[in-house]
Image (tube, rainbow, N blue to C red):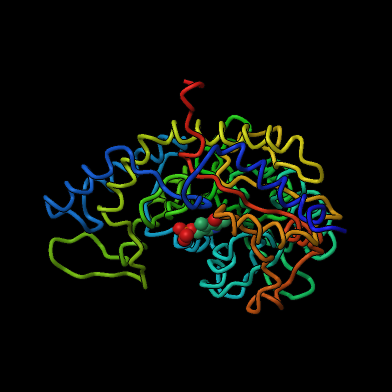
Amino acid sequence: MDVSVSTRFEAQIEQAIQTAIGPREEFVALHEPTFDGNEWDYVKECIDTGWVSPVGSYVDQFEEQIADFTGTEQAVAVNNGTAALEVGLRLVGVEEGDEVLVPALTFVATANAVSYLGAVPHFVDSEWHTLGMDPERMGNYLDDIAEVRSGECYNTETGRRIRAIVPMHTFGHPVDLDSLEEVCDQYHLEIVEDAAESLGSLYKEEHTGRHGRCSALSFNGNKTITTGGGGAIITDDQDLADRARHLTKVAKEDHRWEYNHDTVGYNYRLPNINAALGCAQLEQLPSYLENKRILASRYSEAFSTVQDVTFFEEPDFGRSNYWLNAILLADDREDRRDDVLARLNDADLMTRPAWKPMHRLPMYRDCPRMEVSVAESIYRRLINIPSSVFLGEKTDVER
Ligand SMILES: *Cc1c(COP(=O)(O)O)cnc(C)c1O
């Protein structure tokens, strides 16, 4: 095979990306933030007034606006998405020695949050259609290995209680929540959604993060909006929100001067200066989401003529925020994944494979899991491509 033929596949993929994003002189990141709004004004105000710590009006404002946007009763701002997951899991009753069902294909934080509580992540496979947890196969698997005794679910193989499940919306694409919920009802499992990637994504008509008792959002630097670092617990359960606020403020009781702490709490609150950044970002979120859909449709068109490559599109029951765009290589092209990655990164187009599945990481190798062949295959075939909001801005012609 001559060289031009052997690299044509990689070249076509590079060309499709260039077509979709237009001419770019500089390095194109996978996802970089845009600060074109009131970020500077609000952050400067925090510094000018001295209100930089977690006590301050931007925190309250940010929480209200997040609750408004997602349609939940309460949002509790915390210092990152992982902390939101950890506290959420603890508040729905996950205890040391429990198992928690999490996707095999996820960012490591999902499994880490479970581990911080002394609980054990138990890995569930993905389905192709959402890239997220497969409700049907998970249900069949639980039929084999789980039983409900006095209202609680037990793993008959390990003897441990299975307390909760953490469905994750992969790259912003909504997972099949109703079907997962049916299985959870049958097995008495609490749902805590990892909605870290899905701000602005809808499941049916509702914002993602509304099926669980509570859910976690992330505002890390690479997410759809950012507070630098930050996260939130969203919930309709007022009592849970109150407990989350208390627990993340070192469990200190309100008092004019006394230091009364009623449990081992966390210092997990979001600082005001970060919340200020978040308030400015939230003002722009609707336009960000619009740009992201424009970029996704440009990718979809550009890849429609590339053989053996599929641009991943949202499932028909939902609306994705297209946080990270993704292409899937055909089965028999999976051995070219690293060549494609090398070519694109050499061309200053930052691209990444999907996360290594959790059971392949040394600390999670021995955790219980169902058969996870779809997660494995996604890992071998998927590539995330540049997805920053500004790449989807309308061109002069489109305006
Ligand atoms: C980003 C992310 C998190 C964690 O958020 P941080 O704010 O970085 O702690 C958790 N789960 C998933 C799936 C994520 O993508």
Q: Nearer the viewer, residue 50 or 223?
A: 223
* Vertical arrangement, residue 162 with respect to residue 186, above or below: below
**At x 42% / y 59%, what residue is drawn?**
80
Q: In the shown orientation, is residue 177 left or right of residue 306?
A: left
* Vertical arrangement, residue 75 with respect to residue 89, above or below: above
- Report if residue 283 is visible in the image: yes
Q: Position of residue 30 (x, y in %)?
A: 53, 52
- Report if residue 87 is visible in the image: no
Q: Position of residue 342 (x, y in %)?
A: 65, 61
Q: Position of residue 134 (x, y in %)?
A: 76, 51
**At x 61% / y 75%, what residue is drawn?**
97
Q: Position of residue 164 (x, y in %)?
A: 62, 59
**At x 68% / y 35%, what residue is drawn?**
302
Res 247 → quadrant: bottom left
Q: In the shown orientation, is residue 366 left or right of residue 390?
A: right
**At x 77% / y 45%, what residue is drawn?**
309
* Vertical arrangement, residue 146 with respect to residue 63, above or below: below
Q: How many marks?
A: 0
Res 335 → quadrant: bottom right
- Is the N terminus in the top left, top right, bottom left or bottom right quadrant? bottom right
Q: Nearer the viewer, residue 21 or 262?
A: 21
